[in-house]
Image (cartoon, rainbow, N blue to C red):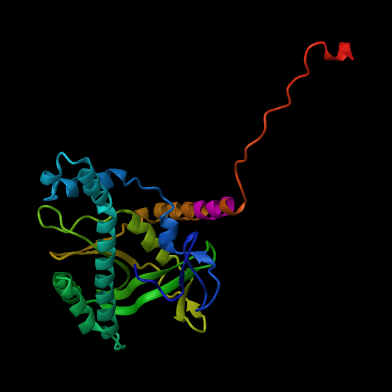
Amino acid sequence: MTQPSLAHATDHGRMYSRSIGGTPEVPSITTVIGQEHKDLTGWAGHMASAELAGDARLANAVGSPAELKRLARQASSAAERFRDAAAARGDRVHHYAEQVALESLGLRHGVGEARAALAEHRESGFADRFDEWWQLYGVTPLAAEVTVWNHTLGYAGTLDLVADIGGRTCIIDFKTKGLTRDGRSKPLSDSVVMQLVAGMQAEEMLLDARSGEWKPWPYGTDPVLLAVAVSEAEVVPNQASPAVLKAHWHKFWALRQVWEHSRATESAGIALRPIAPPPLPAPAGADAEQ
């Protein structure tokens, strides 16, 4: 992911400060959501075995334990490499989306450079489909890559886009997705609803990072929350159902408490310490002998 100007990598995850050079004060929205445990060991194992099975060197390695071990060690990092490549691709797509919004806002932008970066990685399809969606939905941006803050619960984050679509204010989160076997965009995770509702519940938005100037959040009154899957084949916008927002907000609130208590326990000191066995009992008759 890209690093917003007020975001800091800490031992407790990404945190935000109030101005450039300020002390990190609250966790990011994604750090809070990350407190929910997700078991990816099965996926990681699949990625490793699939890479090893498709390695052209495997046949010649049979019978050589050392060579097999070397190939297995390389394959074991397949999931990590896939994740890093997907994150880099997501950064490029998000950057392009931001530049398109800045251009529409009449601000300084780098649309050409962002599109060239995608073309360099053979990812122009993402930009093409994004442009089609932008025109089809008549997107009018209001704010791009806007940093928000909630004092009551204690968190901050950076939202991809706030825009007017069809006369409604929309809070939008873009997710870069690969394709299914039938060539369609892969589905989104429901956790994006927590991300969107946390953005909706913001209390302030950043005006100037250097001076630390903020203003009240003006877009939290009945916005449409959109999670937009961007793939090379299609762009699929999904609305977070208004009926589920309260439940997802409560889950986000609970995860924020998990983050706080986890930090408290980590800073409380050593949790377990070894102890010596109890004193041995005096031998029988020892008092009588004395």
242, 135: nearer the viewer: 135
Between residues 71 and 131, which one lies in front from this camera angle?
A: 71
Q: In the displayed structure, does residue 129 sit left or right of residue 170? A: left
Residue 146 visible, this angle: yes
Q: Whole-percent x and y of residue 129?
A: 15, 70
**Res 167 seen here:** no
Q: Which residues are magenta?
A: 258-265
| Residue found 62% across the figure and 40% down from its top | 273
| Magenta region includes residue 158 | no
Q: Is residue 228 above or below residue 258?
A: below
Q: Is residue 9 above or below residue 191?
A: below
Residue 99 in the image: above or below residue 191:
below
Q: Name the residue rendered at 52%, 65% in the picture.
A: 26
Based on the displayed image, in which of its 4 quarters is residue 223 positioned? bottom left
Residue 63 is left or right of residue 168, and the answer is: left
Q: Is residue 261 magenta?
A: yes
Considering depth in this image, is 282 or 24 the residue closer to the camera? 282
